[in-house]
Image: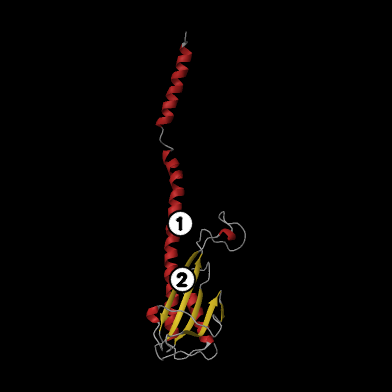
Amino acid sequence: MMRAGAHLGIAGIRKKTAGFWSNRRGVAAVEFALIVPILLVLYFMTMEASQAIETSKKVSRIGSMVADLVTQQPTIVKADLDAIMQIGTSTIQPYNRSTPSITITAIQVTTDTPPRVNVVWSRKMVNGVASIATSLPATTTVPTTLRVAGTFLIRVQSNLSYAPIITWTTDTQQKLGLTQSLTTTIGMGETYYLRPRRSLTIPCSDC
């Protein structure tokens, strides 16, 4: 036989349980805690994607700008080429997690049959250091539409290994759960061909 005290105790537990389930005061905090990680991931993904697209555009701009500056010169020297490449490198700012490489190649298409595509001179900048890109004598290739006998071309190749900010480390110590050896990069590059603007060729006396 159930006593009255026991009956009242069970009723009280049921009442408290019903009150607990009907209490909605902590729901907002729980929902916020669940949603915030998702929102943060979406935010960083959007930010990274927009920065990567903008950086890719700048890499393309490097090639067109360098090619335009070089083809405006009737003659040139390697000091001028190095300065132009340095200017091109600076256009990638404020992105600074990796350094673009730039290669300038002067190309002469001969009047032979079939025409040969010779490298006249070349210069490159990698990690801020300028040097000869191709030892002479050397040949190269160009698109079929540009392989016109007796013409001179300037080719500029700009490349960048884009390092996403969420995986970038400045040293070998672990950051954000990743190390430098695990850093993923995205290759970005562009190649531009332009003809001389003020002369038939652009000789480089000390290249």
Image quadrant in which the C terminus is located: bottom right
- Rendering quarter of residue 43: bottom left
Disc number at residue 207? none
Q: In this view, does 172 lie to the left or right of 167?
A: right
Q: Residue furthest right?
A: 172
Contact (CB < 8 A) between labels 2 and 1?
no
Question: Observer-nearest residue: 162 or 165?
Answer: 162
Which residue shows up at 48% across the image and 85% down it? 118
Q: Residue 52 location, x and y as percent?
A: 44, 64
Mark 1 residue element: helix
Q: Is the residue 84 above or below the residue 34 in the image?
A: below
Which dot, 2 or 1, sits closer to the camera?
A: 2
| Coloration of the structure image | secondary structure
Kind of residue at badge 2: Gly
Mark 2 residue element: strand
Which residue does the numbered mark 2 point to in the structure image?
189
Q: Is the residue 84 above or below the residue 3 in the image?
A: below
- Rendering quarter of residue 196: bottom left
Q: Is residue 168 left or right of residue 56?
A: right
Question: Observer-nearest residue: 5 or 41?
Answer: 41
Q: Residue 205 location, x and y as percent?
A: 53, 91
Q: Earlier in the sequence, mark 2 or mark 1?
A: 1
Q: Residue 181 location, x and y as percent?
A: 59, 60
Q: How far apart are marks 2 and 1 (CA)?
A: 24 Å
Which residue does the numbered mark 1 point to in the structure image?
44
Give the crowd class for mark 2: few <14, some 14-19, many >=20 residues within 10 Å.
Answer: some
Q: Which residue lies furthest to the top in this view?
A: 1
Kind of residue at badge 1: Phe
Q: Residue 10 location, x and y as percent?
A: 46, 18
